Amino acid sequence: MPRSHRVAVLGGGSFGTVIANLIAVNGHRVALWGRNAERVDLINTLRENREYLPGYRLDDGLRATTSLADAVSDTDIVFVAVPSASFRQIVRDVAPLVAPQTCLVSLTKGIEPGGFRLMSEILREELPANPRAVLSGPNLASEIAAGQVTGSVVASDSDALNRSLHDLLHSERFLVYASRDLFGVELGGALKNVYAILAGLCAALSFGENTVGMLLTRALAEMSRFAVRLGANPLTFLGLAGVGDLFVTCSSPLSRNYRIGFAVGKGEPLDAVLDAMDQVAEGINTLALLKAEADRRGVHMPLVNGLYGILYEQRPVTEIFSDMMSREQAHDVEFAVGDFHPTHSARREG
């Protein structure tokens, strides 16, 4: 008989809610933590997160709470689904409340502001004794809630932990795959948000399918080029957490980052677009951090440089696209068989 887990999901947005519900439907006890008392009360009484997932019925095995201590009490797995800007503080608050064997899983696709720390690195720094993992992939919350078949990747350095998380989440319509390339899976989820903004710009300007195809493949080349410099395996980017997530986020108006790019491409000021959004779009924060880190490491990323020029330097969109494409390196495939030699020290380079 499968083991029953005691789970907390921290973050009452759309993705945190849908993951919590998937786990509850699978027969596990789940506490969903959120700051908004009114939303928490409505979840418990109406069995619905009306603000983020209206019409999505929540399982009776899920309960919501505003108490962090209550949420993580007596748990063996804690998922963290809060914006990257508040991730460290939430994890720091959780640290004295959980046992050393409690597993922490990041659902956040972003980079910590003020540096270039991935969420798994924050988990390692704040809870060094606890096992940790990440979940990433082409996972639009509204489609998961609608029952669309979805694939995702769990990544950790432990096969046993990956199996446990697979069994916790896997169902007929939410398919879970495993990876040991934690940095690669995590970077795929974070970096694709930047290129989704660019894809939205392309759509707003009615760029052709040829251009979109070139954009996606050059974006994949940039992502893997940068990730390998940090110690990731480039083959990870051929999977769900790489090209799968990139394709979905760069082609769907459901993506918040895509919507930002589309609005800016239609002439709306960036600040006004961000103010109108009801959830955090991680790509804006990631863009500035990624450009700074790529410049520091000397990684060639013309798409990132071009988008940064559009959003932060007010350069004309049409001029930047021409500049990006003319300055791209001549090689089509970034890594061929035999080119890649992993180095475990790369992440701490510099």
Image (cartoon, rainbow, N blue to C red):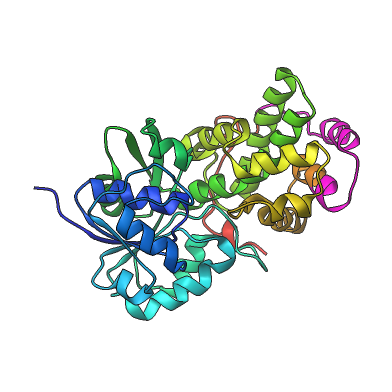
Q: Quadrant of the C terminus?
A: bottom right
Give residue 225's quadrant in the image: top right
Above or below, comparing residue 126 to residue 161 in the picture: below
User: Where are the magenta residues, as a range?
Assistant: 308-333
Residue at screen point 69% across, 34% down: 199
Q: Nearer the viewer, residue 154 or 194?
A: 194
Does 107 sit left or right of 226 as displayed? left
Above or below, comparing residue 74 to residue 288 in the picture: below
Q: Is residue 139 visible?
A: no
Q: Position of residue 232 (x, y in %)?
A: 53, 48
Q: Is residue 237 located in the magenta-colored stretch of the structure?
A: no
Q: Position of residue 54 (x, y in %)?
A: 43, 44
Above or below, comparing residue 64 to residue 68 in the picture: above
Q: Nearer the viewer, residue 257 or 95?
A: 257
Does 257 sit left or right of 128 as displayed? right
Q: Give the total of numbered labels.
A: 0
Q: Is residue 102 visible?
A: yes
Does 313 sit left or right of 58 as displayed? right
Q: Residue furthest bottom?
A: 96
Q: Position of residue 99 (x, y in %)?
A: 28, 75
Q: Is residue 326 located in the magenta-colored stretch of the structure?
A: yes
Residue at screen point 29% across, 68% down: 102
Q: Nearer the viewer, residue 125 or 268?
A: 268
Give residue 175's quadrant in the image: top left
Residue at screen point 51% across, 36% down: 235
Q: Position of residue 98 (x, y in %)?
A: 31, 75
